[in-house]
């Protein structure tokens, strides 16, 4: 595999420079300005390196686009109009660092090329139904990958793709270019809907809802109300959490099947730190485009809080004593020592404090504490580590306004960004981590549990 370095050409006569462009391909900006007679479209086929040199020159200087387009024989750009060629090159120019020139390029060898295309194919298969590897790439000829190395990002790879026909001649595949433009335009439409300040929230929500309905399986899984809730949550997320402006979004990679954007600065759920996040889109064999934007469900301490009664709450992870619990729930139906003598400590006066794990059963709720009993008393103080709601006809407690027996959809209405059937939410605080889990049977919530877990 040979790296090809892009250099400046010495000044020469028009005829000499025309010979150089066919042999070396790349020239400075002034070169094409001096050409009076452009390359005849019926001229000999350009070799792959010659074609690639012209492409790189177009990437580096958009003022040369027209001359470069006409310098490529028609047989090597069949059905690729000038406008699509220009738009396609402008997209490639944005990859990684938009203002950084390509200083070197190299064709991957056959083994590396197969590995690279396999990665594209495998990512595609994980998201959307795909044909075999051969059938997936067949419309684009024999696809070869070219690594582009930019002057400001020499350790970061970006790629261009050249097709070869049955005769081994290199060409620009119109199908590859059109598919790439389509997936890019779809992503731009998505970002514009979310970030355009001139569009009101209701219009943004409506537009995102339409895109979500096109996601595979969404229309059959989620009601219109849930899809709208997901869309509204997405709009709010970009408004409240995304600090980067759209012109700061980084195009990390693109090809005929997928696009990967990085949003550099997004606020964490607690609003204290910034992190980068990726948004991708995939184009299926049926030409359907699906955006993968895994927006996190923002969680607050309501998920570890049980509404006991009007104005009274109980929260997993906090300390309580036996008298406080009795004021809230009364005398337990049953108290069980789950683990005895976890630890035993004796103070200077010889008074023992024994740590036990206890379970308290009440109507509608079951509580587990890491409790400490001092001096043989039945009174205790300890941390609430687990809450389980129990079906009871006389009393019903709720978590996030959701009760046992409620419809499954109530979970998705309250937490629109969790996936259907995946009803475990985690909350982290300074004192630890708790999981809230809803279990569902026949469309109804049968179990609600809040439990401490390891960080």
Image: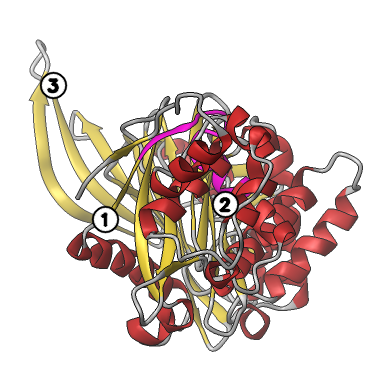
Q: Mark 3 points at which residue?
A: 351
Q: From this view, report whether residue 396 is shown above or below residue 295.
A: below
| Res. 397 visible in picture | yes
Q: Where is residue 136 in the image (x, y as percent from the top left)?
A: 42, 81
Q: In this view, does 360 lie to the left or right of 110?
A: right
Q: How far, Cα to Cα, is label 3 from label 2? A: 53 Å
Q: From this view, report whether residue 195 is shown above or below residue 12.
A: below
Residue drawn at x 40%, y 29% as measured from the top left = 7
Q: Could you say whether the residue bearing mark 2 is in a helix, strand or loop?
A: loop
Q: In which quarter of the image is residue 356?
A: top left
Q: Name the residue under label 1.
A: 108
Front tag of 1 and 3: 1
Whether the magenta-drawn stretch holds residue 281 is answered as no
Q: Where is residue 236 in the image (x, y as percent from the top left)?
A: 73, 45
Q: Are marks 2 and 1 in contact (CB under 8 Å)?
A: no
Q: Name the residue under label 2.
A: 295
Question: Which residue is more in the foreground, 258 or 388?
Answer: 258
- The span picked out in magenta is 90-104
Front tag of 3 and 2: 2
């Amino acid at each position: 595999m040979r790296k090809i370095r892009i250099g400046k050409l010495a000044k020469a006569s028009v005829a000499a420079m025309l010979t150089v462009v066919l042999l070396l391909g790349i020239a400075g900006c002034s070169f094409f300005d001096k050409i009076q007679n452009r390359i005849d479209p019926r001229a000999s086929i350009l070799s792959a390196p010659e074609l690639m040199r012209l492409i790189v020159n177009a990437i580096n200087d958009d003022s040369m686009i027209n001359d470069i387009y006409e310098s490529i024989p028609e047989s090597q750009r069949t059905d690729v109009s000038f406008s699509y060629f220009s738009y396609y090159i402008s997209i490639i120019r944005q990859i990684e660092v938009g203002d950084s020139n390509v200083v070197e390029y190299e064709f991957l060898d056959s083994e590396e090329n197969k590995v690279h295309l396999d990665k594209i194919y495998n990512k595609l298969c994980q998201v959307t139904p795909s044909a075999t590897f051969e059938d997936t790439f067949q419309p684009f000829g024999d696809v070869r990958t070219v690594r582009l190395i930019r002057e400001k990002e020499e350790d970061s790879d970006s790629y261009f793709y050249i097709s070869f026909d049955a005769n081994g001649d290199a060409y620009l595949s119109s199908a590859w270019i059109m598919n790439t433009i389509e997936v890019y335009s779809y992503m731009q439409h998505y970002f514009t809907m979310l970030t355009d300040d001139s569009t009101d929230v209701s219009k943004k929500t409506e537009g995102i809802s339409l895109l979500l309905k096109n996601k595979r399986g969404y229309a059959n899984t989620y009601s219109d109300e849930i899809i709208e809730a997901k869309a509204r949550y997405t709009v709010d997320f970009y408004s409240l959490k995304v600090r980067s402006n759209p012109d700061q979004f980084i195009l990390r990679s693109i090809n005929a099947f997928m696009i990967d954007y990085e949003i550099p600065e997004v606020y964490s759920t607690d609003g204290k730190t910034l992190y980068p996040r990726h948004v991708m889109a995939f184009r299926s064999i049926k030409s359907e485009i699906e955006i993968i934007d895994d927006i996190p469900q923002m969680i607050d301490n309501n998920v570890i809080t049980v509404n006991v009664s009007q104005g009274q709450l109980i929260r997993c992870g906090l300390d309580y004593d036996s008298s406080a619990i009795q004021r809230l729930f009364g005398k337990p139906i049953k108290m069980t020592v789950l683990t005895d003598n976890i630890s035993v400590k004796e103070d200077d006066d010889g008074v023992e404090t024994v740590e036990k794990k206890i379970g308290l059963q009440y109507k509608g709720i079951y509580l587990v504490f890491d409790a400490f009993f001092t001096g043989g008393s039945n009174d205790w103080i300890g941390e609430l580590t687990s809450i389980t709601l129990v079906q009871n006809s006389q009393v019903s407690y709720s978590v996030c306004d959701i009760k046992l027996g409620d419809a499954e959809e109530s979970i998705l209405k309250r937490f629109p960004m969790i996936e259907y059937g995946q009803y475990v939410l985690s909350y982290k605080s300074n004192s630890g981590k708790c999981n809230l889990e809803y279990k569902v049977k026949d469309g109804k919530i049968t179990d609600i549990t809040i439990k401490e877990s390891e960080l």
